[in-house]
Amino acid sequence: MVAGYLLALLSLLLDRHKILGFTGLLLAIVASLLGTAEAQGFGEWRQALYFGLDYFVANTLFLGFLFVPLERWFPHRGDQTVLRPEWDEDLFYFLVSAMFIQGLSFLTLIPSNFVNEAITLDALQEWVGSIPFAVQVILIMLATDFIQYWLHRAFHEIPVLWRLHSIHHSAKSMDCMAGARM
């Protein structure tokens, strides 16, 4: 599965016509959606690995159903279309970002399996559980916004990170998918 995604990515990057790359990517996505991407863990620990396709499909559908009608009713420009120039590039970036987020989440959660055995966080979990749900939502939104702000600022101010992040600001036409360039 990984080889299929990597070869599709390589073809999309190198081939001007991109038909083979998109065909390979489509076949890899179909195979993943059919459930052939389950990775077996060590011992009794088993974790499904989906390469971010669940996140990608859910977000694509959500964005499509929400923003496409809004952009049709209230266009930024009079000639704005759904399939604008660069839409395929932004969809590709959106897929890669979804896969990266899923992979990074998977990798960051692996140590938690070992930490949970060594350190119990029962008191912290009980304290968070005792907070009203609405307050929990507000606190997590504030924490998430705080972290995202400082990370985004770091991507603008640290030259090495800016080289990676500048693609996010390279869209020639703005719509809901232009922000997927990460």
Image: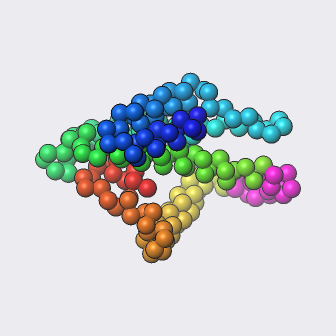
Picture quadrant of residue 164: bottom left
- Whether residue 39 is in magenta: the answer is no
Residue range highlighted in magenta: 114-130
Image coordinates of residue 3 in percent, x first then y, are: 57, 38
Question: Would you place residue 173 above or below residue 42 in this image?
Answer: below
Image coordinates of residue 110 in percent, x first then y, are: 73, 49
- Residue at (81% x, 52% y) in the render: 114
How many labels, in total? 0
Q: Identify which residue, 167 or 78, lies in the foreground.
A: 167
Picture quadrant of residue 170: bottom left
Image coordinates of residue 59 in percent, x first then y, are: 45, 40
- Residue at (46% x, 32% y) in the render: 24
Q: Identify which residue, 99 or 80, lies in the foreground.
A: 99
- Whether residue 126 is in magenta: the answer is yes
Is 109 placed left or right of 29 in the picture? right
Image coordinates of residue 46 in percent, x first then y, are: 75, 36
Q: Identify which residue, 2 or 175, lies in the foreground.
A: 2
Question: Would you place residue 30 above or below residue 151 in this image?
Answer: above
- Residue at (41% x, 30% y) in the render: 23
Residue reaching furthest to the top:
34
Specify whether residue 59 is in view. no
